[in-house]
Amino acid sequence: MTKTIKHILVDQELSIAELARRIKKSRTWTSLVINGHMKSPETRKAIAQALKAHVEDLWENNGKRAA
């Protein structure tokens, strides 16, 4: 998981499981996308919106970050 996302989750007192529920995805899928193992622009956008951030701020290279 990127430090940026990890810090945001801690600051917002959110677990990956709760984030996954908010974006209506599985915890496993959410974790895979956060860590860069799976690339899903749709899920990245949902994560960014749930965390009140921009995709570009969470994943480098215009949303295409290699974790």
Image: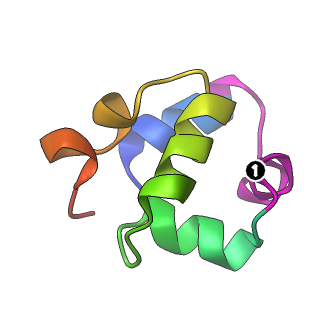
- Closer-to-camera residue (55/14): 55
Residue 20 included in the magenta stretch of the image: yes
Q: Secondary structure at mark 1?
A: helix
Q: Quadrant of residue 3?
A: top left
Is 54 above or below relative to 62? above
Residue 13, quarter of picture: top right
Residue 2 position within the rendered picture, expressed as x and y whole percent measured from the top left: 37, 50
Q: Residue at x 68, y 33 (%)?
A: 50
Q: Is residue 65 above or below residue 37?
A: above
Identify which amino acid the numbered label 1 is placed on.
Answer: Ile
Q: x%, y% of residue 63?
A: 28, 46
Seen in the picture, residue 52 relative to 67 is either above or below; the reply is above
Q: Residue at x 86, y 55 (%)?
A: 21
How far from the left and from the top, in percent, is residue 67?
A: 27, 63
Q: Residue at x 19, y 41 (%)?
A: 62
**Residue at the disc numbered 1:** 23
Q: Position of residue 4 (x, y in %)?
A: 40, 36
> Which residue is at the front of the view, 12 or 53?
53
Give the prevailing secondary structure in the magenta stretch: helix
Against 55, residue 31 (above or below) is: below
The answer to which of 9 and 29 lies nearer the viewer is 29
Residue extending furthest toward the front: 42
Q: In the rendered structure, which segment of residues is drawn in magenta? A: 11-24
- Classed neighbour count for the residue bearing mark 1: other residues with Cα under 10 Å, few (<14), some (14–19), many (≥20): some
Was residue 13 drawn as part of the magenta stretch in this picture? yes
User: Quadrant of residue 37 in the image?
Assistant: bottom left
Identify the residue at image location x=13%, y=44%: 61
**The N terminus is located in which quarter?**
bottom left
* Residue lying furthest left: 61
